Amino acid sequence: MSGSTRDHYDRLAASYDEIWAAHSEAFNGWMSEHILERLNLRADDRVVDLGGGTGIFSAALATQVHEVVCADPSPEMLAQLPRTSGALVPVQASAEDVASGRVRLPYDHVDAILIKEALHHVRDREAVVAGLARLLAPGGRLLVVTLPTVISYPLFRRALEVFAERQPDPAGIAGAMRAAGLTVEVTYETYRRGFARDRYVAMVRSRHMSLLSEFGDAELENGIREIEREHPEEVLEFDDRFAFVLGRHP
Ligand SMILES: C[S@@+](CC[C@H](N)C(=O)[O-])C[C@H]1O[C@@H](n2cnc3c(N)ncnc32)[C@H](O)[C@@H]1O
């Protein structure tokens, strides 16, 4: 991963769960259900949460299988894995490391790989998807959960433009999976978010999304003023829409 992405997650790691989880239990439950429904796990499946970060969704996967490998290039994110669960096996590796075989997993083949909101950090997505498809056992599933290129977050205009320029199109991810020999299904789900305005502004100021690391302090403060101007309401509500790109090994 790039130096700035690494810095972003190293800095954010300690507060990541607080920002996204503790205040979004309902969201995590909702998202976990949609992930589990698609992966259709069996107790002895070999499962990897790639770019798993602090393990929020590795823990959800571990409710259905004996063991989940949580792989992430950021040791600071991995250090936040829930300690109570022996079912989570941390592996410090990027998607590129795993796909190329540079870092070996505890298994030769896997039954399910989840990549939730991490594939946008990968530059050569075709090669990584192809490498991961080769790791799948017959019947194995690769599930990429990602934001679409157009999001309706109450961010400032320039941030939304930069997001749209950088974010991979789910159709492109589906194409890479098809090219790798997987059968693919793309579905969307929407979660209605609501954040108190002050809290949302504090999240933006803490650069809760890696996208915001692209902006200097002055640009960010200008952006926050724009958000405050455009959104006088006390609670900012918006639709958080996710693409679920599911590839299956035939
Ligand atoms: C937005 S967080 C998502 C974490 C977790 N999947 C979740 O949904 O809570 C993105 C994660 O991707 C990881 N990451 C960055 N570059 C990566 C890469 N090249 N391969 C795999 N993961 C990467 C970061 O360290 C970070 O933990």
Image: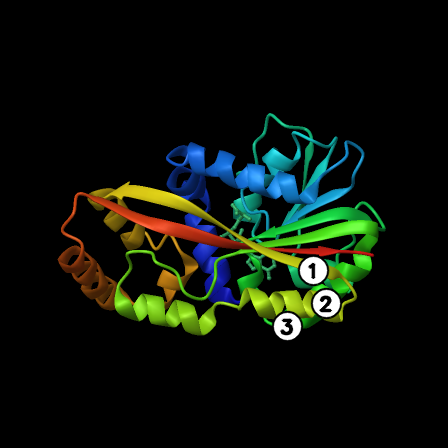
User: Do the CB atoms of the residues marked 1 and 3 lie less than 8 Å apart?
Assistant: no
List x then y, in percent, for residue 94.
64, 58
- Picture disc at residue 178: 2
User: Do the CB atoms of the residues marked 3 and 2 lie less than 8 Å apart?
Assistant: no
Q: Residue shown at 70%/53% (left/top)?
A: 142
The number of numbered discs placed on residues in the rendered structure image is: 3
User: Do the CB atoms of the residues marked 1 and 2 lie less than 8 Å apart?
Assistant: yes
What amino acid does circle 1 point to? Val
What amino acid does circle 2 point to? Arg
Question: For disc 1, does the CB lie below 8 Å from ligand 1?
Answer: no
- Element under disc 3: loop
Inter-mark Cα distance, 1 to 2: 7 Å
The image quarter in which residue 158 lies? bottom left
Identify residue for label 3: 124
Placement of the C terminus among the 4 image quadrants: bottom right
Left or right: 221 as drawn, with respect to 1 = left
Inter-mark Cα distance, 1 to 3: 19 Å
Identify residue for label 1: 184
- Picture disc at residue 81: none
